[in-house]
Image: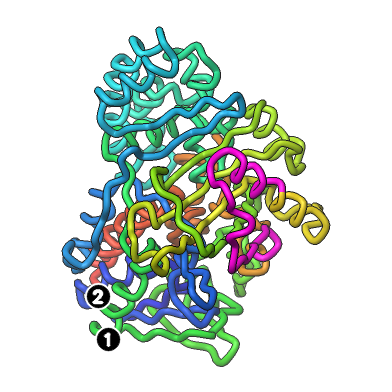
Amino acid sequence: MNIGIVGGGIGAMTTALLLTKKGFDITIYEKEDRLGGRLAFEEGARHKIDRGPTIVLLPDMLLEVLEEAGIDRSKVELIPCSPMYDIHYNDGTTFKKWQDTYEQYEEIRKVFPGEEENFPKYMKEMQVAYDLGKPAFLEKSFIRKRDFFTMKNLFTLSRLSAFKSVKRLTQKYFKDERLQHAFSLQTLYIGGAPHQSPGIYSLIPFAEHAFGIWYLKGGYASLVPILEKELTKRGVTIHKNTRVEKLMINDGICKGVRTNKEPVMHDAIVFNGEIPHMESMMQTEPPVQKKSRAYTPSSGCVTVYLGTNKRWSGTSAHQFFLSEDFHSNMTDIFERNKIPEDPSFYVFSPTQLDEEAAPPGESVFYFLIPVPSAGAINWEYETQRLVDQVIEKAESLKFTGLRDSITWKKVRTPLESKQDGLYEGGSFGLAPILKQSGVYRPQMIPYPVENLYAVGASVHPGGGIPIVMQGARLLANYLLKELSDDGRV
């Protein structure tokens, strides 16, 4: 069985590894000169740091899928973050998030006295929700809508308060709005607003406490060469600098791809990219019925990468700096489509966990500023002001002497993300809003075309590296079953 995979992101590599274990012949087509997609490094003369994801959630899921794909766990070194991160509020308050339940209880008691009593209730009820939600939604696909709308799933959706927002759900447990933000800002990990993302995504802040936050030594992107080495070892054909221009479809069957070099026939095609871009690539005879719809992109990011000649101690690797009015900040980004006057932002400093992440005595930083996707914003005009504002705030609140210590700086905007192929410049695929979640998100068979499949952040079960890998596992298992039933493998 010969399968072509369009795109070389983590979804593609995981799918390929899982299928080659079963004897499939795989070819990957990647338009860039490297594999990995969002998993990449930004590099200066002396510094290197992840370009995209930095926070490792659901480590067991990550390792389980890798192991199933034939990658030994010993090849991936995960370092626990303790505390998981610090949250700095505009009023000068700092609140630490801990995986340990007792430590978190005590932290809430210290910073938000009187609020701590509801934390055990939060953990107990979220554990029940997670135990119901994981097998119901993360471990199943919904190619047929009736598979989603079962009595059991409707009960689970009710228990997850799926039709409330994550922000509103936290109000059940915490009165102080700052604490509500601390247990709902995690929707930003997948490009969604706390007040817009449905309650099912409350499993993200719970998962932090249940499984912790981890750092992959060397950077998240160091996973890519490990997987690529194994793909090469198994004989997977990898075409880099090769753009797929058309998916060749005839009589409702996908027969192969047309690249910028030549047409190539395959028994099946897996598309690992942004689903909204897929439709323009479908060359069909006769025209196929397409599910034309308006998609909402996730938020964008202005990311700032810094190398410094100074190292700070006694600080967490992950830190969040929240604006005075965080809700208004989110509304500016997700509803008004404007850059906030008082931006919130995230800072990653891996040297706090890994001394080898930068040369001795030096540091490397990653600043992520949530902003609207590319849209109509004049990034050339807005970016420098925004970056200066954020660096100044970080320096005044935490990193004394930061500006004068900078020896390397690089900035990426949603415009660069859009040029790289991310839908409308959104950094996390499709936004995790209700109409793009669960059964309403594109599935592994996104169009009524035989032998055409999809995997990636814009496909159910959604974004985040372990979740995309889980989606690849769902697809691989489906292909093995369906093609075996058809007698093709």
Of residues 113 and 407, the one nearer the viewer is 407
Name the amino acid, label 2: Thr
Residue 23 at x, y percent in the picture: 21, 77
**Image position of 406 (left or right of 108):** right
Q: Say what secondary structure mark 2 lies in.
A: helix
Question: On the image, numbered disc 1 is attached to which residue?
Answer: 235
Gap between marks 1 and 2, in whole Å? 9 Å
Judged from this view, the residue extending furthest toward the bottom is 261
Q: Quadrant of the N terminus?
A: bottom left
Is residue 338 highlighted in magenta?
A: no
Q: Say what secondary structure mark 1 lies in.
A: loop
**Image position of 428 (left or right of 352):** right
- Answer whether labels 1 and 2 touch (C-beta < 8 Å): yes
Of residues 61 and 488, the one nearer the viewer is 61
Residue 232 at x, y percent in the picture: 29, 84
Q: Residue at x 38, y 19 (%)?
A: 108
Q: Earlier in the sequence, mark 1 or mark 2?
A: 2
Q: Residue at x 46, y 26 (%)?
A: 162
Tell me which segment is drawn in magenta: 389-416
Of residues 296 and 344, the one nearer the viewer is 344
User: Is 141 above or below relative to 34?
Assistant: above
Residue 378 is marked as none
Residue 257 at x, y percent in the picture: 51, 80
Residue 218 at x, y percent in the picture: 34, 65
Q: Residue at x 30, y 63 (%)?
A: 479
Question: On the image, numbered disc 2 is attached to which residue?
Answer: 20
Please rate how many residues cluster around mark 1, counting C-alpha atoms within 10 Å: few if below 14, some from 14 to 19, many from 20: few
